[in-house]
Image (tube, rainbow, N blue to C red):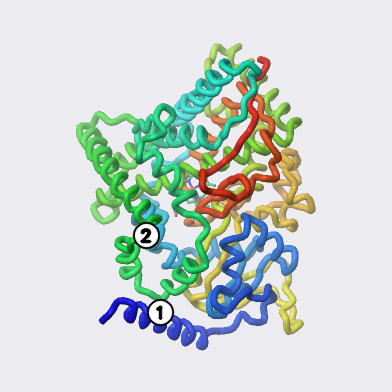
Amino acid sequence: MDSAFCIGVLITSGILYALYKRHLRISLRDVPGPKPESFWLGNLRQVFHSLVGEIDTQWQEQYGGVVRIKGSFGDDRLWVADPKALQHIFQTSGYNYPKQPERRALTRLVADEGLVFADGDAHKRQRRAMLPAFGQNEAKSLVPIFNRNAAAITQKWTDILSETPSHAVAINVASDLSSATLDAIGEAGFDYKFGCMENQDNELVAGYQKVMTLGATPPSPGRILFSEISHYIPMWLSNVFYDNFPSAGLDYLRRNRDLSHKIARDLIASQTETVASGKSTSKDVMSILIRANKSLDGKNRLTDDELISQMRTILLAGHETTATTMNWALLELSNNPAVQTRLRSEVYSMKTSLQARGCGEFSASDLDTMPYLSAVIKEVLRMYPVSFHNHRQSARDDILPLSKPMTLKSGLVVHEIPVPKGTKVLLSITGYNRNKDVWGEDAHVFNPERWLTEDATKRASNVGVYSNLLTFSGGLRGCIGWRFALYELQSFLVELITNFEFTPAMDTNRLFKVPCLVMTPALDGDLSKGAQMPLRVTLTSR
Ligand code: HEM
């Protein structure tokens, strides 16, 4: 039989099955929402192609915190930014809103079957095994590594500036931030030296720097449709597709996978040997994980393949997320000189007290006692949640509670919405982080001050793992590395703000928040050169 015929039969069966399932479901038709753009893609082109946050703001302003949107072939689904509904999905309902299978198949390609991929009992077991490596003390002990890797940027930029007569230069900070944070996660995560600041041509390094951006550009309409149809295809068949289908993008991801498997295998073998010899005292995440794993009984222990998966998972989830957040932080500091100056003076005053104590560098406790630094970081995380959407589906019929009553199209006012089994839900992290009911009328304004008043903590609901922000998600699947990320952000910002002043190098309206796997900054939306954050950098007068 010819392959075009088989694919045709597969697609037709997928569509018929989807229509049949839909026919049997409770309806969400009465929930207000936008008109679909087409029968084939519903509102999905808007979801995947609009600049990050744009469509979320529009829908939230027009319809409120829960909106009915359309998927392919008229499928009803929910867009959610309502605090109570999110709290229910992320926290109260446990594992009843698993990830969508078609998205898990793609996750498997970029991060294997590790923690981001796993669901239900497999997730519970993996998470339990990994938690000892991600505690507060473990994160604190990594601060010297973050300081050292941040200082590598200072060294490089100081060298560039000393050779520039004007002592001011426009730098694409995205590139060095990506390299230095990859080096940092190499050391802090695996006691491994990528050496990325010295050599950006290394194939693995180049690969990782682009997995989140070039490897995961906004999907074409064809790719969206394929993903929608593959929802109805068994996971094993999707895996065969992703493992074999000839395509430049997939080839790129597969090559990256092979290379990182090789490195991970060697690294884990040598760390396992050190742990077995009883000599391991390393504080990197993988060494702690291997030590903790050794003490678990057989059925709870992670296998070698699962350890390899976790290494790729940590690289995927922990690298570009932090680097990209840092880009947006520096942009906001450039655009808000008063905030930059105030932050620098807090850093200088802490530095002076460190010197008085005879200390050379910032410790975790120093970083923890800088209120303005904390306020700036929280505000950046609120405005720029780099992982901006979370795609789930209901595993059974459910009732979604609302924090505000909703008027249905029929005129009926409701306080909760029935959610049929199998409904896809788009959890809008960016929508919640700018929800005016939570953050006030100035929700769209960058204002670190809001975190210094008591009101901010009172007003916010209890949704996410950190400061009631949803940036690190929440509940059982909340970001396991959030403490790691916070210390890294603190350490890098302190180092850079101590040594450099930042101003915009060009009209910053030309910088777009492109919806790749992370919210990637790109000039005029052009991703061909990867992430771009051109800032004018000068040495501080200190
Ligand atoms: C600013 C930086 C970061 C942000 C904004 C962020 C955000 C997130 C979000 C939104 C999720 C939920 C994703 C989902 O459910 O699909 C997540 C999960 C995860 N993050 Fe982070 N993350 C950051 C840094 C890190 C770091 C530094 C690490 C590791 C060192 C890390 C490791 C993970 C892992 C392993 C998961 C999966 C957790 C699970 O499913 O149980 N993240 N992160």
- Direction right: furthest residue: 441
Question: Which mark, by number, is residue 11?
Answer: 1
Query: Real-space Cα distance between discs 1 and 2?
Result: 20 Å
Please tell me which residue lies in front, 225 or 57: 225
Which label belongs to residue 247?
2
Q: In the structure shown, which secondary structural element does the residue marked by tag 2 occupy?
A: loop
What amino acid type should be assigned to the residue bearing mark 2? Ser
Mark 1 vs ligand 1: CB below 8 Å: no
Picture layout, residue 65 above or below residue 211: below
Question: What's the amino acid at mark 1?
Answer: Ile
Q: Quadrant of residue 200?
A: top left
Where the N terminus falls, by quadrant? bottom left
In percent of width and height, residue 471 lies at 58, 50
Residue 133 visible in the snapshot? yes
Looking at marks 1 and 2 on the same chain, the residue that comes earlier in the sequence is marked by 1
Q: Quadrant of the C terminus?
A: top right
In front: mark 1 or mark 2? 2
Does any portion of residue 123 appear in the rendered image?
no
Q: Nearer the viewer, residue 367 or 337?
A: 337
In front of the other: 62 or 529: 529
